[in-house]
Image (cartoon, rainbow, N blue to C red):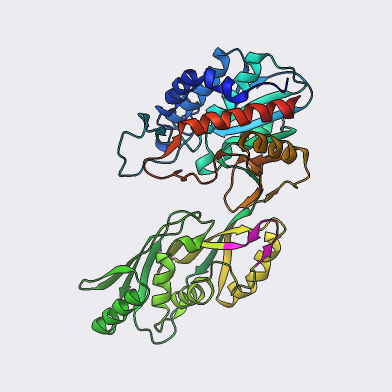
Amino acid sequence: MSEINWQEEVEKRREDFLRDLEGLLRIPSVRDDSAKTADAPFGPDVKRALDYMIDLGEKDGFTTKEVGNVAGHIEYGEGKDLVGVLGHVDVVPVGDGWSNDPFDPVLKDGKLFARGVADDKGPTVAGYYALKILKELGLPISKRIRVIVGSDEESGMSCVERYFETEEQPTMAFVPDAEFPIIHAEKGISELDVSFKKSENDGYEAFKLESLESGARYNMVPDHAKAVLSEVQDNDGLKQEFENFLKSHDVTGDFSVTEKNVTLSIVGKSAHAMEPNNGVNAGLLLVAFLGKFELTGTARDFVTFGRDYLFNDSRATKLGINYEDKESGELTMNVGILRYDAKEGGTFGLNFRYPVTADMDKLKNKMETVVLEYNGEYTHYDDSKPLFVPEDHPLIQTLQQVYTEQTGEEATLLAIGGGTYARHLETGVAFGALFPGREDTMHQKDEFSYFDDLLKATAIYAEALYKLAK
């Protein structure tokens, strides 16, 4: 059976693939909690996209099942062992500045433009068509294959958690929701809130910090920050200092005065939390500026901790928990949420991406001594363990062999700080569908995939599934 020309089989289905993918891309499947119902926990459009994939499988003669209205699968074959492909049909919000309607796909110069075409509808349909090819060719396999479809990958992955509460884990699986060649290591991801309770002021202060607000998500570098001050002793002096600070850090901001208050704002640059150094954290810049002045009580604890231990230290060296391994690289720390209120106290929402050999519980306990020195405490902790599949595992070796044969390129192993469904699998890796050297437009305006790349990925997936399920 090795004479199968996988690429040719995909090409025969080119028009059908495009039609089925465009149908899915037209559904604006952004999570909408305001419209959720018992039958559509993430909103009606997300449910519609999930139903679309399940209906496709049913129409093509596969066994299908929907689970909890949040996930489902399309299955083929018989046997005790199960091979899986996990994709998702939800997409991130559209944002501004698109050249075309993001939910009306446009194929132009070989590129297919639409929200979700790269992340992750295109690759999900590629995984589905790979399975369809095996079925239509009637190839002999000794295991079952499931395309598992989730609908909440972009905001928590609760869909696969729910799915695996009642459904079996695949023996081996891959997730077409990243890049080629093979991602065999994903760092652990944890959220940690460090909070400072309201305490009394005790002495002279240059001003009273009324509030500070920056960031909305743990997994993003905040690009805007605002602080409100009252009882400022010297407005002109403060304004001059602020302007000098903005200049020295090459950022823009604003200083405005009302009868009672002074408002400071800073504009930074957003980036994904897995590499905070790609962004400019507006919140931490503002904290660093405020830290130049005499403050008391909670404001002093909050600002000084932020200035001394969080500002300009994405590797958490000052907290004493910097860590690196050869399997997956360095620990990174992003300060994604900063809140202070004179009546309530303050909080830093931290996001750590930690190497696969690290123990985050131990690291968290280690840095607590510093937190306690500043009258701080932990108020929220959530941890998603790292993923690591060794290079000699049969899953890795099979995927490497198929990738190398079909592309002529070496199938190197990668480690990332991001997270895919693979971390919810007992044995799974992220595998494509973005090819090396291609522009990554996921989560951006004018998101696109080269249509031929999606077909090429389908050929790779078809052979991989065949070899894994033989």
User: In the visual, does 230 lie left or right of 426?
Assistant: left
Q: Quadrant of the N terminus?
A: top right
Horizontal arrangement in the rendering, residue 137 relative to residue 39 (left or right):
right
Determine whether 381 is above or below 106 in the image. below
* Quarter of the picture holding the C terminus: top right
The region drawn magenta spans: 323-332
Q: Taking 212 as reference, is 63 left or right?
A: right
Say which quarter of the image contains residue 64: top right
Could you say where residue 29 lies in the image, as x and y percent from the top left?
43, 32
Image position, residue 33 (x, y; %) = 43, 37
- Labels in figure, total: 0
Which residue is situated farthest in the left direction here? 259
**Percent coordinates x, y for residue 79 in the rendering:** 78, 21
Residue 71 visible (yes or no): no
Pick whichever, 117 or 150, lies toward us. 117
Residue under the image location 73 percent in, 28 percent down: 467
Q: Is residue 181 above or below residue 39?
A: below
* Front-most of residues 394 and 344: 394
